[in-house]
Every structure is written in structure tokens, then in C-alpha cells.
Image: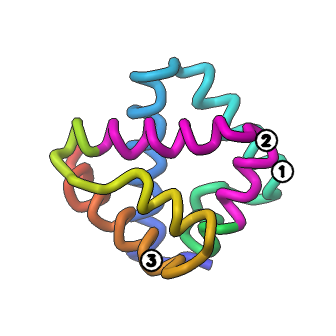
Amino acid sequence: MACGEDKEIIEVFRNVFRRVISSCLGGSVVEAVLFLLRERLRRDPFEVLWDDPKAFYSEMFRVFGDGAKVLVSVLVVGINNKYGLREDPSRLLEVMRSGQGSPDYVRSFMRRVAEVAGGE
């Protein structure tokens, strides 16, 4: 479970997620995605992403099927464009799907996003 600084990172990432997905797919889509994930995971989806990226992705896949890949790709490309990062969407997807290198790889990504977006 996240605490202290980790919670701040998660909160910044949550806000970035909302902004990026809203700008591409609309605010109602973001809220629907988050509602479904929160209901299915029975806790904050961003804390699950922090603690267990594979469980987060597995639930996204159960809900959205191959749309989960699209959603993660849209998120990463949007973050790259908005904040000048160079994250490879396929690498993040592979880590989330396989659990290899997870959660450290995903946490590192979330930290980088929080660093560049934290002042917004």
C-alpha cells in the first residue's frame, strides 16, 4: 500500500491520466473507465497500478478487452506529447501484462510523470 510521497505521486498521476484521456476520448469516458475499475478492483485503481500493475492491467483487459491496450497506448503517447517524455507504450504494456519488472518499472514511469507534471 502506498504512503507519504508515493501517495503524492499517485495523485499527480491520477490527474495526468484524467487530463490526457479526457483530451483524447472525453471526460465521460475517463469517469466511466475509473468507475468500472474502482468497482471491479474494490479500491483506488491508481493504488492498484502502483502496487500490482499486472492486476490493474488484467482487470482493464477483463473490462475493455483489446481496448485496454489502446487505452494504455493513448495514455502513454499523450503523456509523451504533453510532457516531452519518451516512454515506449509497447514496453509499458508488456511490463504490465507480464508482471516482469513490475511494479518497479511502472513506479519509475509514474514518478517521472509526477516530476514533470507535478506543478500543474
Can you say whether 103 is above or below 26 in the image?
below
Q: Is residue 20 left or right of residue 56?
A: left
Asked if disc 1 and disc 2 are in contact, CB closer than 8 Å, the reply is yes
Residue found at x 82% / y 57%: 42
Asked if disc 2 and disc 3 are in contact, CB closer than 8 Å, the reply is no
Q: Which of the marked residues, 2 or 3, is nearer the chain's N terminus? A: 3
Count of marks overlaid on the render: 3
Can you say whether 76 is above or below 32 in the image?
below
Determine if the magenta segment contains residue 70. Answer: yes
Residue 69 screen position, x and y as percent = 58, 44
Q: Which residues are magenta?
A: 55-79
Near mark 2 (Cα within 10 A), the count class, few <14, some 14-19 or many ≥20, is some
- Residue at mark 2 to residue at mark 3: CA–CA distance: 30 Å
Residue found at x 52% / y 77%: 103
Q: Which of the marked residues, 1 or 2, is nearer the chain's N terminus? A: 1
For the N terminus, the image quarter is bottom right
Can you say whether 77 is above or below 48 in the image?
above
Looking at the picture, tell me which residue is in the foreground, 73 or 35. Answer: 73
Near mark 3 (Cα within 10 A), the count class, few <14, some 14-19 or many ≥20, is few
Near mark 1 (Cα within 10 A), the count class, few <14, some 14-19 or many ≥20, is some
Residue 118 screen position, x and y as percent = 26, 53
- The kind of secondary structure element at disc 2 is helix
Can you say whether 72 is above or below 29 in the image?
below
Residue identifier under label 2: 63
Q: Amino acid at mark 3?
A: Gly
Numbered label attached to residue 4: 3
Residue mark closest to the camera, 2 vs 3 = 2
Residue identifier under label 1: 40
Q: Is residue 45 left or right of residue 15?
A: right
Q: Amino acid at mark 2?
A: Val
Q: Is residue 36 left or right of residue 93?
A: right
Determine if the magenta segment contains residue 71. Answer: yes
